[in-house]
Amino acid sequence: MGSKMTDATAAPAFPKDHVAAPEALRFPDPLVPVADPPRTRSAAEEARALVQVGTMASLSTLSDDGHPWGSVVTYGEMPDGAPVILVSTLAEHGRNLVRDARASIVVQQVEQFGDPLDNGRVTLAGTMRAPLDDAERAIAQAAVEAVSPAAAMYGGFGDFSLWILDIDRVRWVGGFGRMDSVTADDYASAELDPVAPSAGYAIRHLNDDHADALLDIARGITGYTDATEATCTRADRYGIDLTVKTPRGTAYTRAGFAEPCTEPGGLRAATVELTKRARA
């Protein structure tokens, strides 16, 4: 005879949306409307940029009792963005993969700015596998050695193996209110951002040495003509994100570059042009 599920064991009911006062999610609008919204990276591009820049990740595998097991690993990147790791069976996560190859990897934004939860991260879930042939094995080995030179030595040990994640699911979170799911195909085909590796330095440099330029950009480009302070929080090939303080409250906005950056060092010229345009 079946037993009725009690309230204590019932599945939780999840709210469909945040329950918050309307004013909690209201920010001041620009005083001068901006005609065309600046271009942003797609969720697939954002996810690829995080994996492109990072070298450390959280790996989740399944223990023999079925519980998830979290580990910190270094990873390399295959040409299609798939993470590759070099793992020993002396480690629990190595033994877990031999028994059950299902896994997920979480990569966080390397350089953090402001609230930690307002920074980017991406979860890649799928099944780990060995390289298919010698050619793929050589690419995978070079990828892990690029981030961890010790892998050149450990790779020859009998207990170490290369594992490549065949991605089934991608979930990108860019910060508060910025998130999306991405198909494995869209993730693999996303264009890499040439300025992603230097974005962290550029953000620090703008905030530390060019606060006046950021304020002019907020006033002249994004329409917040009453801005009293502006801080850069993100930068990519298409533009920069700003947190703007005004007498009406704090706002979050974006200034787009005249042209997308196509070279690794393109952020400097792009932000100089943006400043000149703001001051014109």
Image (cartoon, grey):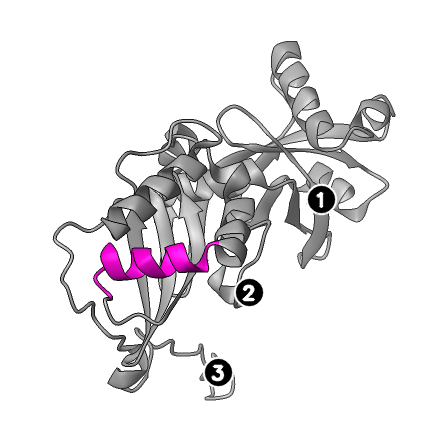
* Secondary structure predominantly adopted by residues drawn in magenta: helix
Earlier residue among tags 2 and 1 = 1
The image position of residue 233, as x and y in percent, is: 45, 58
Q: Find disc 3 in the rendering and name its residue.
A: 3
Relative to 63, is 180 on the left or the right? left
Tag 2: residue type? Pro
Under tag 1, what secondary structure? strand
Q: Quadrant of residue 66?
A: bottom right
For the residue pair 224 and 190, the one nearer the viewer reads as 224
Q: For the point 66% across and 17% down, which residue is it? A: 137
2 relative to 270, above or below: below
Q: For the point 39% across and 30% down, which residue is it? A: 191
Q: How far apart are marks 3 and 1 (CA)?
A: 45 Å
Q: Residue 73 carries which label?
A: 1
Under tag 3, what secondary structure? loop
Residue range highlighted in magenta? 210-224
Q: Can residue 220 be found in the magenta stretch?
A: yes
Q: Find disc 2 in the rendering and name its residue.
A: 116
Neighbour tally class for label 2: few under 14, some 14-19, many 20 plus, Cα within 10 Å: few
Relative to 55, is 230 on the left or the right? left
Tag 3: residue type? Ser
Residue reaching furthest top? 135
Earlier residue among tags 2 and 3 = 3
The image position of residue 28, as x and y in percent, is: 24, 75
Which mark's residue is nearer the viewer, 2 or 1?
A: 2
Relative to 18, is 29 on the left or the right? left
276 relative to 259, above or below: below
203 relative to 184, above or below: below
Q: For the point 53% across and 50% down, which residue is it? A: 205
Which mark's residue is nearer the viewer, 3 or 1?
A: 1
